[in-house]
Amino acid sequence: MKRLKVVSLALATLVTATLFAGCASTKDNGTQNENQATVAENKSADIVVIGAGGAGMSAAMQAVQNGATNVVILEKMPQTGGNTIRTTGGMNAAETELQATEGIEDSVELMVEDTMKGGKDLNDPELVQVLAEKSADGVRWINENGGDLSEVGMFGGASVKRIHKPTGGAAVGPMLVQMFNENLDKLNVPVLLETTADQIIVDEAGKVSGVKASNKDGEFTIDCKAVVLATGGFGGNAEMVVEYKPELTGFGTTNHAGATGDGITMAKELGAQLVDIEQIQTHPTVHPETQTMYTEAVRGNGAILVNKEGKRFVNELLTRDVVSEAILAQTDEISYILFDQNVRDGLKAIEKYIAAGIIYEADTIEGLAEQIGVDGTALKETMDAYAGYQASGTDAEFGRESMEEPLTNAKFYAGLCTPAIHHTMGGVKINTNTEVLKEDGSAIPGLFAAGEVTGGVHGANRLGGNAVADIVVFGRIAGENAAKYVVANGGNTEATITVEKNTEIAKPEVDGGYKDGVYTGTGKGNGGDVTVEVTVEGGNIVKIELKDHKETPGIFEGAETGVSNEIIRTQSTDVEVVTGATLTSEAIKTAVAEAIKDAK
Ligand code: MEZ
């Protein structure tokens, strides 16, 4: 099997935040640099949230909604979203209004039972209880704040339809991140991008008193009363993954480059207890070359898995650990995810895979078999047998219960897949108030944590749809409790940090020597073609506009501004890509290069 290395690219964006320390803190140890416009100054806040993924943004939003007045988010990447932006499937929740409307009989007890079973009973039952109990309120909160969780579907390891998704089965992550960004903007919560938290500071009594951070201007300290640690997991840190689970050497990852486990390291320095740290999940259906994850919803909505011999080999809706293991036992450790037109029509997320050119398609099963190099007769037999199981409601071979489609409606589609690192279940130990606990079980005063940086919620194996439930439920609890803690410890203070986004278009720093005019070009991005319009004036590229694209909202903006500004500044397409938006960055570079090839 072809396994890919995790590649981490250098930051190259011009989208930075300019910081204004409205209230100077006790001492300034910021670094002076004559070549830079801003200087890192010490600052103060009531609550510092570390990490602008789903857990951190839920926490900040809830803290402010609960009355906190001086909250700031630090994010080391050039954009918000963390792994959340990549999430496709949806959010598990039990006893929701939507389930009731659709006549789905679910209960908190059943969600607890499924989650514990999926996690092989290694989960912390108290955390699982809270996850399930507060999940329906989480769905309501997202929808009330402008999100869209309006469909409910089936996922692996769930006894009933429980995963809540956006309209038409669109990817959940971009919807969530857009909702968070808009709300944080409205609530005036500053998000300091490309700003890394390096250390959490505690006073002599062991209470949280600040965060040491750094950005391009140098190091600085933010004095604060509470910290919410929401840095995500370590699935993007191959070295750390292998340290805890050597058998994952050489595996690809679905994680973004920033998922490097920094929060775990910082919490460990304060004596935080770690739980289940060696429990690392692979997602079974990931395209080996591009690391694109085919959401479990493709299987949930009807797709099957076949091996190189054209045969099914597993109940496709078993938990990820079981399905991953089954794929790894097949020839070349690969499988094909196979579906028909009905499945495609019912799930918008599939369009992204088609646009990315990783799906084979044909009018007949035999034609598809030929394309993927599988024996046509064997594949036809498999498909005919499956249609029979679907009609009778009994999967005589593998006992799959939910078979949404007979898979008989042309066209037919297949995508190559293999397991890749997806979720790190272990992390810092928290209690149900999201307080971070030390080895002796006592809480570190003022330190809260939520999301993938924590351990205990998912045990030995996370169910699909429970990551979003985790970030929303425990993110909100962390925000609520941090806000309460601040009040009990002398808050709330006036907001002291403001951020001004630098949306200015860069100016050419060298002579371009191009012919004036407006040129168009196209490049291949994450979701298909990206078309740009390039304006050359006075011999220089002065404007690059994305005219048409299907890139992921929340990701493309960083590439659009960062790469375009860098091209304008240097008058060259030989610029670095923006971390976390590699494909979009490359597409813009290619499109601009094509546009200006006749302008020299
Ligand atoms: O929770 C997840 O990891 C998830 C929903 C993934 C997916 O298959 O879409």
Image (cartoon, rainbow, N blue to C red):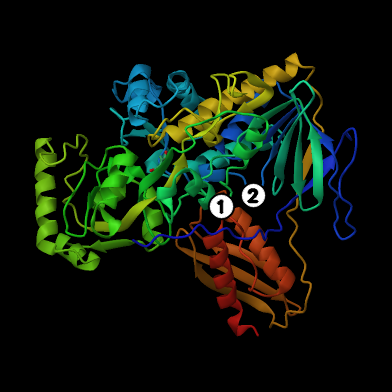
Which residue is nearer to you in this view: 326 or 65? 326
* Horizontal side of residue 274 vs 189, given as left or right: left
Residue beneath the point at 55% across and 20% down: 431
Between the residue at mark 2 and the residue at mark 1, the CA separation in whole angstroms equals 9 Å
Dot label at residue 3: none
Under tag 1, what secondary structure? Answer: loop
Viewer-side label of 2, 1 = 1
Around disc 1, counting alpha carbons within 10 Å, would you say few (fewer than 14), some (14 to 19), or many (20 or more)? many
Which residue is nearer to you in this view: 412 or 289? 289
Label 2 vs 1, first from the N-terminus: 2
Which residue is nearer to you in this view: 168 or 261? 261
Dot 2 and dot 1 residues touching (CB under 8 Å): yes
On the image, the x and y values in percent for residue 403 come to: 20, 39
Q: Which residue is mark 1?
A: 257
Residue 144 appears in the rendering: no
- The quadrant where residue 520 appears: bottom right
Residue type at mark 2: give it.
Met
Residue beneath the point at 24% across and 65% down: 372
Which residue is nearer to you in this view: 541 or 488? 488
Under tag 2, what secondary structure? Answer: loop
- The quadrant where residue 114 appears: top left
Residue type at mark 1: give it.
Ala
Judge: label 2 CB < 8 Å from ligand 1: no
Up/down of 504 relative to 436, above or below: below
On the image, the x and y values in percent for residue 556 come to: 57, 55
Q: Which residue is mark 2?
A: 77
On the image, the x and y values in percent for residue 540 come to: 73, 76
